[in-house]
Image: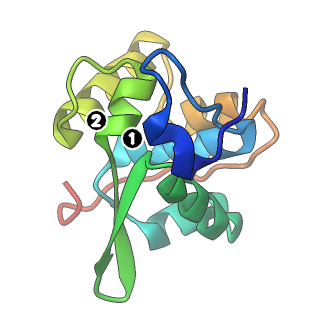
Amino acid sequence: MEVKPSLSDRMPGGVRPDIPQRLMPAAALIAYHQPMSQSTLVGMLGQRAYDHVRELSAMGLISRRRDGLTRRLMTTRRFAEYFGAPDVESSKVRAWFRKQASDAGMTGAELAASLSGGQATIMEYEPSGEEE
């Protein structure tokens, strides 16, 4: 069942909104590299990242805060609950998500590409010290 994001807060706890498959790579990359700049995500996914960030934010799965000329992207409590992370704090969600990828033998870019059905080209990302 698809529910408007604005109504999802009123749904019973067992009902989760469906995340469109096309948004999964962006969600995975944000969770894996958070906090990350939107410009970095655009560098990895291309211009479609702007639309994906807007949609994920409207669904309440990520937060985007102005940080100079870009935005700082992080997962939210709703993201952690949706994906079954054991904690909601962003640094703990990042550690949990990285462990999930590591257990599957994947890097963040490989995990994101696998979530897109192999149809997306995703650039590998090495975080600078400023984003960690």
Quickly name the residue at label 2: 94
Q: Residue at x 52, y 39 (%)?
A: 8
Relative to 118, residue 63 above or below: below
Residues under numbered marks 2 and 1 in contact, where contact means CB atoms less than 8 Å apart: yes
Is residue 74 visible in the rendered image? The answer is yes
Q: Quadrant of residue 70?
A: bottom left
Task: Work out whether residue 62 or residue 112 is closer to the camera in this orientation and state it.
Answer: 62
| Type of the residue with mark 2 | Arg
Q: Is residue 132 left or right of residue 100?
A: left
Quickly name the residue at label 1: 31
Q: Is residue 124 left or right of residue 47?
A: left
Q: Mark 2 or mark 1: which comes first in sequence?
A: 1
Residue 11 is situated, as x and y percent measured from the top left of the image, at 50, 30
| Type of the residue with mark 1 | Ala
Is residue 28 visible in the rendered image? The answer is no
Indicate how the structure is coloured in the image: rainbow
Q: Residue at x 72, y 36 (%)?
A: 21
Residue 98 is situated, as x and y percent measured from the top left of the image, at 34, 28
Q: Residue at x 22, y 41 (%)?
A: 90
